[in-house]
Image (tube, rainbow, N blue to C red):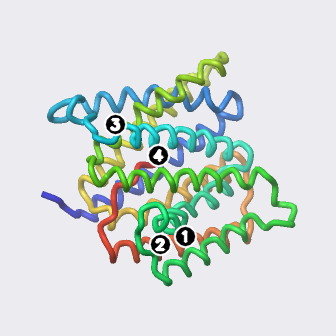
Amino acid sequence: MSQNNARLGIPLMLATTFVFASQDGLSRYLAGEYNTVLIVMIRYWFFALFVVALSASRKGGIRRVAATSQPWLQITRGVLLVAEICVMVVAFVQLGLVASHAIFASYPLLIAALSGPILGEQVGWRRWVAIAIGFVGVMIILRPGFSVFAPAALIPLLSALMFAVYGLLTRYVARKDSAETSFFWTGIAGAVAITMIGPFFWEPIHGNDWWLMGTLCLTGAGGHYLLIKTYEVAEASTVQPFAYFQLVFAASIGLTVFGESIDFWIVMGAGLIIGSGLFTFWRERQRKPVTLKENS
């Protein structure tokens, strides 16, 4: 029986976004000291172990959870997500947490814009207006022609586009596969893919950085566990808007830990993006239930 305990679900979502934001802060530091592919590979090894253990504990075990009639789409999803995470971590290092997350917040707008040509969904004029306003917010943050603009500013936008395509593929495979099946393939396909290239980037991790690496792995698994629990106690349509708090928490870490700066234009642009995203989410909610989103 489904339930919608908002009093529990909303705090759980806020805790989830805080854990994921902390993970982003750890990724930003470690990727500044070591190769990004190496950091993501070790993180994914732990993530894959978590996925296997979780799947084995389910009724029917791994055999039932992993069963799918669309393995290539599931593999594509997993590979795309691990690649997107690598791109986003590079953005953290090159651009910082504040600006990266402000731009990445546009991914729901990209999902809405691409849902028509990719999934054949109808996008009404109200959502197209919201999408346009959201991308005005992106341009305000990027500000082409001003000193803040640099090629690095396009990296989180690429990450948002990749995550949007991943989200659309997740919607597509959900027509036949359960959320736990998609979650299994996300972890396993991603781990296998990055392990094929990660060893070529191996370098020694020194001293206390292993503790930080271990903490990064724990926050990854812990964040996904909290996310699963969130959707067990509350409907996605209730808690999903609170996922934007990851931007707030990540920006706070960027400002206080890494000494990043924030200006009026980033605040204004992020406000337009978030407002437009919430509107498109609300319109989507009027049409059909929202599916579970797996966080990067």
The residue to which callout 3 is attached is 184
Q: Counting other residues with Cα less than 10 Å from the Cα at mark 1, is it few (<14), some (14-19), or many (20 or more)?
A: many
Q: Position of residue 262 (x, y in %)?
A: 72, 62
The residue to which callout 4 is attached is 19
Q: Counting other residues with Cα less than 10 Å from the Cα at mark 3, is it few (<14), some (14-19), or many (20 or more)?
A: many
CB atoms at circles 2 and 1 under 8 Å apart?
A: yes
CB atoms at circles 3 and 1 under 8 Å apart?
A: no
Q: Amino acid at mark 3?
A: Phe
CA–CA distance in space, label 2 to label 1: 6 Å
The residue to which callout 1 is attached is 274
CA–CA distance in space, label 3 to label 4: 21 Å
Kindly state the secondary structure of the residue where label 4 is placed: helix
As drawn, which residue projects farthest toward the top? Answer: 204
Q: Is residue 150 above or below residue 67?
A: below
Kindly state the secondary structure of the residue where label 2 is placed: helix
The residue to which callout 2 is attached is 278
CB atoms at circles 4 and 2 under 8 Å apart?
A: no
Q: Amino acid at mark 1?
A: Ile
In which quadrant of the rendered view does residue 32 lie?
top right
